[in-house]
Amino acid sequence: MDARQVILEPVVSEKSYALMSDGKYTFRVDDRAHKTQIRHAVEEIFDVAVVEVRTIKVPSKPKRRGLHSGRTRSWKKAIVELAPGERIELFEGAAVAE
């Protein structure tokens, strides 16, 4: 799987913003990707050294709109810890803008 297919988008939330100070960055990843693929994709795309990868399956939630009910899609989230001193400029720009 190509690195651009593994990492889908960054997750921007209060929790992910708080983890950035510890050198941990959160991404939405392909459901089929495993930790080794995620590690190689982050190292290739952002040119950083990855220490640890944690993955979480975010479950679907029930939703309603009027009489129609359904569920959101479940998705996979990865929290990537970088080596000390490493950082991703893409996220740092978002933190400054807020």
Image (tube, helix red, strand yellow):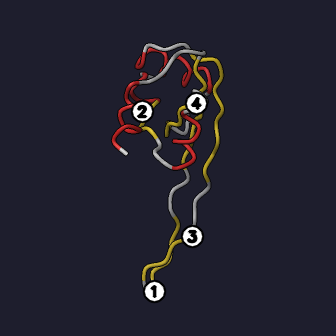
Q: Nearer the viewer, mark 4 or mark 1?
A: 4
Q: Disc 2 to disc 3, how far (Cα)? A: 31 Å
Type of the residue with mark 4: Lys
Q: Residues within 10 Å of mark 2 (few under 14, many from 20)?
A: some
Of pointers 3 and 4, the one earlier in the residue sequence:
4
Q: Secondary structure at mark 2?
A: helix
Are there few (<14), some (14-19), or many (20+) residues within 10 Å of tag 4?
many
Which residue lies under the disc numbered 1?
67
Secondary element at image label 1: loop
Residue 76 is situated, as x and y percent measured from the top left of the image, at 56, 42
Spatial CA distance of label 1 from label 3 is: 13 Å
As measured in the structure, the alpha-carbon distance from the residue carrying label 2 to the one carrying label 1 is 40 Å
Say few, some or many: other residues with alpha carbon within 10 Å of mark 3 (under 14 / 14 to 19 / 20 or more). Answer: few
Residue under numbered circle 3: 62
- The disc at residue 24 is 4
Q: Give SS at disc 4.
A: strand
Of the residues under marks 2 and 3, which one precedes in the sequence? 3
Residue type at tag 1 = Leu
**Horizontal side, residue 84 vs residue 41: left or right:** right
Q: Are marks 4 and 1 in contact (CB under 8 Å)?
A: no
Task: Decide: is 93 above or below 44.
Answer: below
The x and y percentages for residue 96 are: 37, 37
Which residue corresponds to mark 2?
91
Relative to 16, residue 22 above or below = above
- In the rendered structure, which disc, 4 or 2, sits on the residue that comes first in sequence? 4
